[in-house]
Image (tube, grey):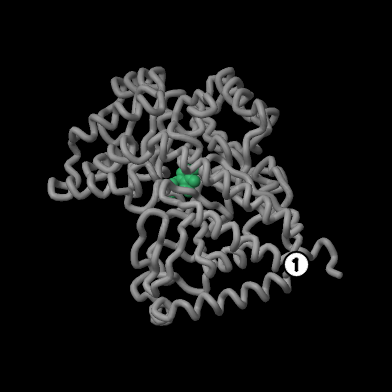
Amino acid sequence: MMSHESLIGGVEPRRIESVREREAARFTAARPKAQRLAAAGHHGYYAGFPLQWMLDWPMPFAMVVAKASGATLTDIDGNRLADFCLGDTGSMFGHSPPAVVRAITAQAGCGLTYMLPTEDTLAVGELLVERFGLPHWQIATTASDANRFALRLARAVTGRDKVVIMNGCYHGAVDETFVALKNGSPVNRPGLFGQVVDLTQHTRVVEFNDLGALEQALAPGDVACVITEPALTNCCMVLPEPGYHDGLRRLTRAAGTLLLIDETHTISTGPGGYTRRYGLDPDIFVLGKPVAGGIPASVWGFTDAIAAAWDRLRAAKDAGYSGIGTTLSANAMALAAMRATLTEVMTDAAYEHMERLAERLCTGLGAAIAAAGLPWHALRCGARVEFICAPGPLRNGTEAHGVHGTDLERAIHLGLVNRGCLIAPFHNMMLVCPATTESDVDRLVGAFGELARELAGRTH
Ligand SMILES: Cc1ncc(COP(=O)(O)O)c(C=O)c1O
Protein backbone atom coordinates (compact mmCIF):
# COMPACT_ATOMS: atom_id res chain seq x y z
CA MET A 1 0.00 0.00 0.00
CA MET A 2 1.44 3.45 -1.00
CA SER A 3 1.47 6.20 1.59
CA HIS A 4 -0.99 8.97 0.74
CA GLU A 5 1.83 11.54 0.38
CA SER A 6 3.69 9.68 -2.35
CA LEU A 7 0.66 9.56 -4.64
CA ILE A 8 0.44 12.15 -7.45
CA GLY A 9 -3.15 13.26 -7.89
CA GLY A 10 -4.20 10.06 -6.12
CA VAL A 11 -2.16 7.89 -8.54
CA GLU A 12 0.84 5.69 -7.81
CA PRO A 13 4.00 7.04 -9.54
CA ARG A 14 4.93 3.59 -10.90
CA ARG A 15 1.59 3.41 -12.67
CA ILE A 16 2.16 6.85 -14.20
CA GLU A 17 5.61 5.82 -15.39
CA SER A 18 4.37 2.61 -16.98
CA VAL A 19 1.58 4.47 -18.84
CA ARG A 20 4.04 7.15 -19.96
CA GLU A 21 6.58 4.61 -21.26
CA ARG A 22 4.00 2.60 -23.16
CA GLU A 23 2.40 5.72 -24.66
CA ALA A 24 5.79 7.18 -25.67
CA ALA A 25 6.58 3.98 -27.57
CA ARG A 26 3.16 4.03 -29.25
CA PHE A 27 3.59 7.69 -30.23
CA THR A 28 7.02 6.95 -31.72
CA ALA A 29 5.86 3.93 -33.69
CA ALA A 30 3.12 6.00 -35.35
CA ARG A 31 5.48 8.79 -36.48
CA PRO A 32 8.54 7.54 -38.40
CA LYS A 33 8.84 10.71 -40.54
CA ALA A 34 8.66 13.11 -37.60
CA GLN A 35 11.10 10.94 -35.67
CA ARG A 36 13.63 11.10 -38.53
CA LEU A 37 13.35 14.90 -38.62
CA ALA A 38 13.74 15.13 -34.85
CA ALA A 39 16.78 12.85 -34.96
CA ALA A 40 18.33 15.19 -37.57
CA GLY A 41 17.93 17.99 -35.02
CA HIS A 42 15.58 20.54 -36.66
CA HIS A 43 18.71 22.27 -37.87
CA GLY A 44 18.81 26.06 -37.66
CA TYR A 45 16.70 26.49 -34.57
CA TYR A 46 18.05 27.05 -31.12
CA ALA A 47 17.16 23.94 -29.10
CA GLY A 48 15.35 22.63 -32.17
CA PHE A 49 12.34 24.95 -32.14
CA PRO A 50 11.48 28.44 -33.42
CA LEU A 51 9.51 29.12 -30.20
CA GLN A 52 10.72 27.67 -26.92
CA TRP A 53 7.16 26.99 -25.80
CA MET A 54 7.12 24.13 -28.30
CA LEU A 55 9.46 22.29 -25.93
CA ASP A 56 6.57 22.02 -23.46
CA TRP A 57 4.63 19.36 -25.34
CA PRO A 58 4.63 15.99 -23.56
CA MET A 59 5.55 13.95 -26.65
CA PRO A 60 9.02 12.33 -26.93
CA PHE A 61 9.66 14.45 -30.07
CA ALA A 62 7.73 17.03 -32.05
CA MET A 63 4.67 16.06 -33.99
CA VAL A 64 5.06 17.96 -37.29
CA VAL A 65 1.84 19.37 -38.72
CA ALA A 66 0.90 18.82 -42.36
CA LYS A 67 -2.42 20.69 -42.26
CA ALA A 68 -5.40 21.57 -40.14
CA SER A 69 -8.97 22.41 -40.94
CA GLY A 70 -11.90 23.07 -38.62
CA ALA A 71 -11.35 20.94 -35.54
CA THR A 72 -9.01 18.41 -37.17
CA LEU A 73 -5.25 18.47 -37.36
CA THR A 74 -3.20 16.05 -39.50
CA ASP A 75 0.51 15.40 -38.97
CA ILE A 76 3.09 14.54 -41.62
CA ASP A 77 2.81 10.86 -40.71
CA GLY A 78 -0.87 10.92 -41.59
CA ASN A 79 -2.23 10.81 -38.02
CA ARG A 80 -5.50 12.74 -37.66
CA LEU A 81 -6.33 14.34 -34.34
CA ALA A 82 -9.41 16.04 -32.95
CA ASP A 83 -7.81 19.33 -31.94
CA PHE A 84 -8.93 20.65 -28.55
CA CYS A 85 -5.76 22.78 -28.14
CA LEU A 86 -6.54 24.96 -31.15
CA GLY A 87 -3.21 26.75 -31.06
CA ASP A 88 -3.69 27.48 -27.34
CA THR A 89 -6.71 29.67 -28.26
CA GLY A 90 -5.32 31.36 -31.40
CA SER A 91 -7.56 29.09 -33.47
CA MET A 92 -10.39 28.96 -30.96
CA PHE A 93 -12.94 29.35 -33.75
CA GLY A 94 -11.47 26.45 -35.72
CA HIS A 95 -8.58 26.20 -38.16
CA SER A 96 -8.96 28.36 -41.26
CA PRO A 97 -12.60 29.42 -40.85
CA PRO A 98 -13.89 29.78 -44.44
CA ALA A 99 -14.89 33.45 -43.96
CA VAL A 100 -11.37 34.31 -42.76
CA VAL A 101 -9.80 32.40 -45.65
CA ARG A 102 -11.97 34.37 -48.10
CA ALA A 103 -11.05 37.68 -46.46
CA ILE A 104 -7.32 37.12 -46.40
CA THR A 105 -7.34 35.73 -49.92
CA ALA A 106 -9.10 38.87 -51.14
CA GLN A 107 -6.70 41.14 -49.24
CA ALA A 108 -3.57 39.21 -50.23
CA GLY A 109 -3.38 40.70 -53.71
CA CYS A 110 -4.07 44.26 -52.54
CA GLY A 111 -1.13 44.87 -50.24
CA LEU A 112 -0.58 43.54 -46.76
CA THR A 113 0.45 46.52 -44.66
CA TYR A 114 0.53 50.29 -45.37
CA MET A 115 0.18 52.07 -42.03
CA LEU A 116 -3.03 53.57 -43.32
CA PRO A 117 -6.59 52.46 -42.59
CA THR A 118 -8.71 50.47 -45.02
CA GLU A 119 -12.48 50.22 -45.20
CA ASP A 120 -12.15 47.02 -43.15
CA THR A 121 -10.30 49.00 -40.48
CA LEU A 122 -13.10 51.54 -40.24
CA ALA A 123 -15.76 48.84 -40.09
CA VAL A 124 -13.92 47.00 -37.31
CA GLY A 125 -13.90 50.09 -35.07
CA GLU A 126 -17.69 50.15 -35.15
CA LEU A 127 -17.95 46.40 -34.67
CA LEU A 128 -15.78 46.53 -31.54
CA VAL A 129 -17.90 49.27 -29.96
CA GLU A 130 -21.09 47.40 -30.79
CA ARG A 131 -19.88 44.05 -29.48
CA PHE A 132 -17.86 44.97 -26.41
CA GLY A 133 -19.43 48.27 -25.37
CA LEU A 134 -16.38 50.45 -24.75
CA PRO A 135 -16.22 53.57 -26.97
CA HIS A 136 -12.50 53.80 -27.91
CA TRP A 137 -10.28 51.09 -29.44
CA GLN A 138 -6.73 50.46 -30.53
CA ILE A 139 -5.33 47.52 -32.46
CA ALA A 140 -2.09 45.77 -31.60
CA THR A 141 -0.40 42.61 -32.85
CA THR A 142 -0.52 40.33 -29.80
CA ALA A 143 -2.35 40.25 -26.49
CA SER A 144 1.03 40.80 -24.81
CA ASP A 145 1.41 44.05 -26.75
CA ALA A 146 -2.13 45.15 -25.97
CA ASN A 147 -1.68 44.55 -22.23
CA ARG A 148 1.68 46.32 -22.22
CA PHE A 149 0.29 49.35 -24.05
CA ALA A 150 -2.81 49.45 -21.86
CA LEU A 151 -0.76 49.34 -18.64
CA ARG A 152 1.50 52.09 -19.95
CA LEU A 153 -1.50 54.24 -20.71
CA ALA A 154 -3.08 53.46 -17.32
CA ARG A 155 0.05 54.69 -15.58
CA ALA A 156 0.24 57.75 -17.78
CA VAL A 157 -3.37 58.85 -17.30
CA THR A 158 -3.52 58.17 -13.55
CA GLY A 159 -0.02 59.49 -12.81
CA ARG A 160 0.48 56.43 -10.56
CA ASP A 161 3.26 53.87 -10.82
CA LYS A 162 1.88 50.68 -9.23
CA VAL A 163 0.03 47.79 -10.85
CA VAL A 164 -1.87 45.02 -9.05
CA ILE A 165 -1.93 41.50 -10.48
CA MET A 166 -3.41 38.18 -9.36
CA ASN A 167 -1.11 35.44 -8.14
CA GLY A 168 -0.75 32.76 -10.82
CA CYS A 169 -1.87 35.07 -13.62
CA TYR A 170 -0.50 35.17 -17.14
CA HIS A 171 -1.04 38.13 -19.47
CA GLY A 172 1.74 37.54 -21.98
CA ALA A 173 5.30 38.83 -22.14
CA VAL A 174 4.49 41.79 -19.90
CA ASP A 175 7.18 42.45 -17.31
CA GLU A 176 4.78 44.07 -14.82
CA THR A 177 2.94 40.77 -14.51
CA PHE A 178 5.97 38.56 -13.78
CA VAL A 179 5.58 38.69 -10.02
CA ALA A 180 4.23 35.85 -7.87
CA LEU A 181 3.61 35.06 -4.24
CA LYS A 182 6.09 32.67 -2.66
CA ASN A 183 5.13 31.64 0.86
CA GLY A 184 2.93 34.74 0.93
CA SER A 185 5.65 37.21 -0.18
CA PRO A 186 6.01 38.81 -3.64
CA VAL A 187 8.99 37.62 -5.73
CA ASN A 188 10.09 38.11 -9.33
CA ARG A 189 9.01 35.02 -11.26
CA PRO A 190 12.11 32.82 -11.31
CA GLY A 191 11.76 31.83 -14.98
CA LEU A 192 12.01 35.40 -16.32
CA PHE A 193 15.16 36.13 -18.34
CA GLY A 194 17.24 39.27 -18.45
CA GLN A 195 15.20 41.50 -16.18
CA VAL A 196 17.40 43.87 -14.20
CA VAL A 197 14.63 45.74 -12.37
CA ASP A 198 13.10 44.38 -9.19
CA LEU A 199 9.54 44.05 -10.47
CA THR A 200 8.11 43.81 -6.96
CA GLN A 201 8.87 47.52 -6.58
CA HIS A 202 6.04 48.45 -8.93
CA THR A 203 3.79 45.39 -8.93
CA ARG A 204 1.69 44.18 -6.02
CA VAL A 205 0.36 40.66 -6.21
CA VAL A 206 -2.74 39.37 -4.44
CA GLU A 207 -4.67 36.12 -4.53
CA PHE A 208 -7.70 35.93 -6.82
CA ASN A 209 -10.97 35.76 -4.84
CA ASP A 210 -9.41 37.66 -1.90
CA LEU A 211 -11.09 41.06 -1.65
CA GLY A 212 -9.46 41.79 1.72
CA ALA A 213 -5.98 41.48 0.21
CA LEU A 214 -7.04 43.59 -2.76
CA GLU A 215 -8.35 46.33 -0.50
CA GLN A 216 -5.05 46.38 1.34
CA ALA A 217 -3.05 46.54 -1.90
CA LEU A 218 -5.12 49.49 -3.12
CA ALA A 219 -5.15 51.34 0.20
CA PRO A 220 -2.05 53.54 -0.35
CA GLY A 221 -3.84 55.15 -3.34
CA ASP A 222 -0.87 54.65 -5.69
CA VAL A 223 -2.20 51.85 -7.93
CA ALA A 224 -2.78 52.81 -11.55
CA CYS A 225 -4.45 49.61 -12.62
CA VAL A 226 -5.60 46.16 -11.57
CA ILE A 227 -5.14 43.70 -14.42
CA THR A 228 -6.93 40.36 -14.29
CA GLU A 229 -8.68 37.70 -16.28
CA PRO A 230 -12.32 37.36 -15.21
CA ALA A 231 -11.52 33.73 -14.34
CA LEU A 232 -7.91 32.61 -14.08
CA THR A 233 -7.18 30.28 -16.98
CA ASN A 234 -3.42 30.03 -16.94
CA CYS A 235 -2.95 28.22 -13.61
CA CYS A 236 -5.43 25.43 -14.33
CA MET A 237 -8.77 27.17 -13.99
CA VAL A 238 -9.94 29.26 -11.04
CA LEU A 239 -13.47 30.64 -11.24
CA PRO A 240 -14.57 33.80 -9.41
CA GLU A 241 -16.59 33.25 -6.27
CA PRO A 242 -20.05 34.86 -6.08
CA GLY A 243 -19.72 38.61 -5.51
CA TYR A 244 -16.00 38.72 -6.36
CA HIS A 245 -16.35 40.82 -9.50
CA ASP A 246 -18.74 43.27 -7.81
CA GLY A 247 -16.20 43.70 -5.01
CA LEU A 248 -13.32 44.08 -7.47
CA ARG A 249 -15.14 46.85 -9.33
CA ARG A 250 -16.30 48.59 -6.14
CA LEU A 251 -12.82 48.61 -4.57
CA THR A 252 -10.96 49.71 -7.70
CA ARG A 253 -13.43 52.53 -8.26
CA ALA A 254 -13.19 53.69 -4.64
CA ALA A 255 -9.39 53.76 -4.93
CA GLY A 256 -9.34 55.68 -8.23
CA THR A 257 -7.69 52.63 -9.82
CA LEU A 258 -8.43 51.50 -13.37
CA LEU A 259 -9.67 47.96 -13.95
CA LEU A 260 -8.28 46.07 -16.95
CA ILE A 261 -10.13 42.87 -17.84
CA ASP A 262 -8.07 40.59 -20.10
CA GLU A 263 -10.52 38.44 -22.09
CA THR A 264 -7.93 36.76 -24.29
CA HIS A 265 -8.90 33.30 -23.00
CA THR A 266 -12.32 33.95 -21.45
CA ILE A 267 -13.75 35.08 -24.77
CA SER A 268 -14.75 31.40 -24.65
CA THR A 269 -17.65 32.53 -22.43
CA GLY A 270 -19.74 34.22 -25.09
CA PRO A 271 -19.73 36.57 -28.09
CA GLY A 272 -19.00 39.56 -25.82
CA GLY A 273 -16.72 37.59 -23.51
CA TYR A 274 -17.22 37.09 -19.80
CA THR A 275 -17.66 40.85 -19.51
CA ARG A 276 -20.88 40.98 -21.47
CA ARG A 277 -22.25 37.69 -20.22
CA TYR A 278 -21.84 38.63 -16.57
CA GLY A 279 -22.20 42.41 -16.83
CA LEU A 280 -18.67 43.42 -15.81
CA ASP A 281 -17.77 47.07 -16.25
CA PRO A 282 -14.03 47.39 -16.93
CA ASP A 283 -12.19 50.62 -17.76
CA ILE A 284 -9.98 48.73 -20.19
CA PHE A 285 -10.77 45.55 -22.12
CA VAL A 286 -8.13 43.42 -23.86
CA LEU A 287 -8.62 40.60 -26.35
CA GLY A 288 -5.95 38.92 -28.47
CA LYS A 289 -5.28 35.47 -29.93
CA PRO A 290 -8.46 34.41 -31.83
CA VAL A 291 -9.85 37.87 -32.60
CA ALA A 292 -8.61 37.75 -36.20
CA GLY A 293 -9.23 34.01 -36.66
CA GLY A 294 -5.57 33.08 -36.13
CA ILE A 295 -3.84 35.96 -37.92
CA PRO A 296 -1.76 37.86 -35.29
CA ALA A 297 -3.84 40.76 -33.94
CA SER A 298 -5.28 42.06 -30.68
CA VAL A 299 -7.61 44.82 -29.58
CA TRP A 300 -7.84 46.99 -26.52
CA GLY A 301 -10.71 49.29 -25.68
CA PHE A 302 -11.23 51.95 -23.03
CA THR A 303 -13.63 54.51 -21.60
CA ASP A 304 -14.37 58.14 -22.52
CA ALA A 305 -12.61 59.25 -19.32
CA ILE A 306 -9.38 57.51 -20.35
CA ALA A 307 -9.65 58.91 -23.87
CA ALA A 308 -10.07 62.44 -22.50
CA ALA A 309 -7.05 62.01 -20.24
CA TRP A 310 -5.03 60.66 -23.19
CA ASP A 311 -6.03 63.77 -25.18
CA ARG A 312 -4.68 65.98 -22.41
CA LEU A 313 -1.44 64.03 -22.25
CA ARG A 314 -0.93 64.21 -26.00
CA ALA A 315 -1.50 67.96 -25.93
CA ALA A 316 1.10 68.35 -23.18
CA LYS A 317 3.85 66.06 -24.55
CA ASP A 318 6.17 66.04 -27.53
CA ALA A 319 4.69 64.02 -30.39
CA GLY A 320 5.99 60.52 -31.26
CA TYR A 321 7.69 57.68 -29.37
CA SER A 322 4.86 57.17 -26.92
CA GLY A 323 5.77 53.51 -26.44
CA ILE A 324 2.31 52.56 -27.66
CA GLY A 325 1.99 50.72 -31.00
CA THR A 326 4.33 48.77 -33.29
CA THR A 327 4.93 49.07 -37.04
CA LEU A 328 2.73 46.17 -38.10
CA SER A 329 -0.11 46.96 -35.66
CA ALA A 330 -3.45 47.33 -37.47
CA ASN A 331 -2.07 46.11 -40.79
CA ALA A 332 -4.56 45.61 -43.61
CA MET A 333 -4.34 41.81 -43.61
CA ALA A 334 -5.08 41.54 -39.88
CA LEU A 335 -8.02 43.92 -40.16
CA ALA A 336 -9.53 42.02 -43.07
CA ALA A 337 -9.30 38.82 -41.02
CA MET A 338 -10.71 40.56 -37.95
CA ARG A 339 -13.69 41.95 -39.78
CA ALA A 340 -14.55 38.50 -41.12
CA THR A 341 -14.07 36.94 -37.68
CA LEU A 342 -16.29 39.47 -35.92
CA THR A 343 -19.07 39.36 -38.49
CA GLU A 344 -19.10 35.76 -39.71
CA VAL A 345 -17.25 33.56 -37.24
CA MET A 346 -17.84 34.75 -33.66
CA THR A 347 -21.59 34.44 -34.10
CA ASP A 348 -24.28 33.64 -31.53
CA ALA A 349 -24.95 30.36 -33.35
CA ALA A 350 -21.27 29.38 -33.16
CA TYR A 351 -21.24 30.07 -29.43
CA GLU A 352 -24.43 28.08 -28.85
CA HIS A 353 -22.82 25.05 -30.48
CA MET A 354 -19.57 25.51 -28.56
CA GLU A 355 -21.37 25.91 -25.24
CA ARG A 356 -23.51 22.82 -25.76
CA LEU A 357 -20.59 20.58 -26.67
CA ALA A 358 -18.38 22.03 -23.93
CA GLU A 359 -21.08 21.12 -21.41
CA ARG A 360 -21.20 17.60 -22.86
CA LEU A 361 -17.41 17.39 -22.55
CA CYS A 362 -17.29 18.72 -18.99
CA THR A 363 -20.08 16.43 -17.81
CA GLY A 364 -18.47 13.46 -19.56
CA LEU A 365 -15.09 14.12 -17.94
CA GLY A 366 -16.73 14.52 -14.54
CA ALA A 367 -18.49 11.16 -14.97
CA ALA A 368 -15.24 9.49 -16.10
CA ILE A 369 -13.45 10.85 -13.03
CA ALA A 370 -16.21 9.57 -10.77
CA ALA A 371 -16.16 6.15 -12.46
CA ALA A 372 -12.39 5.90 -11.93
CA GLY A 373 -12.83 6.96 -8.29
CA LEU A 374 -10.08 9.57 -8.56
CA PRO A 375 -9.95 12.77 -6.46
CA TRP A 376 -10.07 15.03 -9.55
CA HIS A 377 -12.58 17.47 -10.98
CA ALA A 378 -13.58 19.09 -14.29
CA LEU A 379 -14.94 22.57 -14.83
CA ARG A 380 -15.51 25.04 -17.62
CA CYS A 381 -15.72 28.66 -18.61
CA GLY A 382 -18.01 28.62 -21.67
CA ALA A 383 -16.25 26.69 -24.42
CA ARG A 384 -13.07 26.26 -22.36
CA VAL A 385 -12.96 23.08 -20.28
CA GLU A 386 -10.30 21.95 -17.83
CA PHE A 387 -9.70 18.78 -15.86
CA ILE A 388 -7.68 19.15 -12.71
CA CYS A 389 -6.00 16.20 -11.03
CA ALA A 390 -6.99 17.34 -7.54
CA PRO A 391 -10.20 18.01 -5.65
CA GLY A 392 -11.86 21.34 -6.39
CA PRO A 393 -12.83 24.00 -6.79
CA LEU A 394 -9.47 25.77 -6.56
CA ARG A 395 -9.76 29.26 -5.06
CA ASN A 396 -6.55 30.93 -6.18
CA GLY A 397 -3.13 30.73 -7.80
CA THR A 398 -1.41 29.21 -4.79
CA GLU A 399 -3.88 26.33 -4.65
CA ALA A 400 -3.54 25.87 -8.41
CA HIS A 401 0.26 25.93 -8.30
CA GLY A 402 0.29 23.02 -5.88
CA VAL A 403 -1.62 20.64 -8.13
CA HIS A 404 -0.59 20.97 -11.73
CA GLY A 405 2.32 20.53 -14.11
CA THR A 406 2.91 16.98 -12.91
CA ASP A 407 4.18 13.85 -14.68
CA LEU A 408 0.66 12.55 -14.27
CA GLU A 409 -0.70 15.28 -16.55
CA ARG A 410 2.00 14.63 -19.12
CA ALA A 411 1.21 10.91 -19.23
CA ILE A 412 -2.48 11.68 -19.76
CA HIS A 413 -1.76 14.22 -22.53
CA LEU A 414 0.40 11.70 -24.35
CA GLY A 415 -2.21 8.97 -23.96
CA LEU A 416 -4.85 11.31 -25.39
CA VAL A 417 -2.68 12.11 -28.43
CA ASN A 418 -2.34 8.38 -29.12
CA ARG A 419 -6.12 8.10 -28.98
CA GLY A 420 -6.55 10.92 -31.49
CA CYS A 421 -7.12 13.93 -29.20
CA LEU A 422 -4.82 16.91 -28.79
CA ILE A 423 -5.14 19.14 -25.71
CA ALA A 424 -3.10 22.20 -24.67
CA PRO A 425 0.37 21.37 -23.38
CA PHE A 426 0.71 23.89 -20.54
CA HIS A 427 -2.19 22.67 -18.47
CA ASN A 428 -5.28 20.53 -19.04
CA MET A 429 -7.20 22.93 -21.23
CA MET A 430 -9.61 21.78 -23.91
CA LEU A 431 -11.37 24.16 -26.25
CA VAL A 432 -14.49 23.38 -28.23
CA CYS A 433 -14.73 25.21 -31.55
CA PRO A 434 -17.63 25.67 -33.98
CA ALA A 435 -16.37 22.71 -36.05
CA THR A 436 -16.00 20.30 -33.10
CA THR A 437 -18.46 17.41 -33.36
CA GLU A 438 -20.22 15.29 -30.77
CA SER A 439 -18.11 12.36 -31.85
CA ASP A 440 -14.90 14.41 -31.27
CA VAL A 441 -16.12 15.11 -27.74
CA ASP A 442 -17.12 11.50 -27.13
CA ARG A 443 -13.77 10.30 -28.38
CA LEU A 444 -11.99 12.59 -25.91
CA VAL A 445 -14.23 11.56 -23.02
CA GLY A 446 -13.74 7.87 -23.90
CA ALA A 447 -9.95 8.20 -24.17
CA PHE A 448 -9.74 10.16 -20.93
CA GLY A 449 -11.94 7.61 -19.13
CA GLU A 450 -9.80 4.71 -20.34
CA LEU A 451 -6.60 6.38 -19.11
CA ALA A 452 -8.15 7.51 -15.82
CA ARG A 453 -9.36 3.98 -15.06
CA GLU A 454 -5.96 2.52 -15.82
CA LEU A 455 -4.16 5.12 -13.73
CA ALA A 456 -6.54 4.45 -10.86
CA GLY A 457 -5.83 0.74 -11.17
CA ARG A 458 -9.37 -0.08 -12.24
CA THR A 459 -8.82 -1.93 -15.45
CA HIS A 460 -12.26 -3.58 -15.54
C1 LIG B 1 -5.02 35.85 -20.58
C2 LIG B 1 -3.89 36.05 -21.53
N1 LIG B 1 -3.55 37.29 -21.90
C3 LIG B 1 -2.54 37.51 -22.76
C4 LIG B 1 -1.82 36.47 -23.28
C5 LIG B 1 -0.70 36.76 -24.24
O1 LIG B 1 -1.03 36.36 -25.53
P1 LIG B 1 0.09 36.41 -26.66
O2 LIG B 1 1.09 35.36 -26.30
O3 LIG B 1 -0.64 36.08 -27.91
O4 LIG B 1 0.67 37.77 -26.66
C6 LIG B 1 -2.13 35.17 -22.92
C7 LIG B 1 -1.37 34.04 -23.47
O5 LIG B 1 -1.56 32.89 -23.13
C8 LIG B 1 -3.19 34.96 -22.02
O6 LIG B 1 -3.53 33.73 -21.63
- Residue 49 spot, x, y in % from top left: 40, 67
Relative to 66, does residue 364 appear above or below in the rendering? above
Q: Is residue 368 visible?
A: yes
Q: Quadrant of residue 199?
A: top right
Q: Quadrant of the N terminus?
A: bottom right
Camera-side residue of 223 and 423: 423
| Outermost left residue | 110
Q: Residues within 10 Å of mark 1 (few under 14, many from 20)?
A: few
According to the picture, the residue beneath numbered tag 1 turns out to be: 458
What's under tag 1, amino acid-wise? Answer: Arg
- Residue 95 spot, x, y in % from top left: 36, 53
Q: Is residue 234 left or right of residue 367?
A: left
Camera-side residue of 63 and 192: 63
SS at badge 1: loop
Q: Quadrant of residue 113?
A: top left
Task: Report the residue at 68% width, 46% height from top.
Answer: 398
Task: Report the residue at 59% width, 63% height from top.
Answer: 447
Q: Quadrant of residue 216?
A: top right
Q: Is residue 90 left or right of residue 321?
A: right
- Residue 321 spot, x, y in % from top left: 29, 36
Camera-side residue of 129 and 41: 129
- Residue 340 spot, x, y in % from top left: 28, 40
Q: Quadrant of the C terminus?
A: bottom right
Task: Report the residue at 52% width, 42% height from top.
Answer: 356
Task: Report the residue at 49% width, 81% height from top.
Answer: 29
State the count of labels. 1
The verdict on label 1 being within 8 Å of ligand 1 is no
Relative to 349, does residue 401 appear above or below in the rendering? below
Q: Is residue 198 visible?
A: no
Camera-side residue of 133 and 321: 133
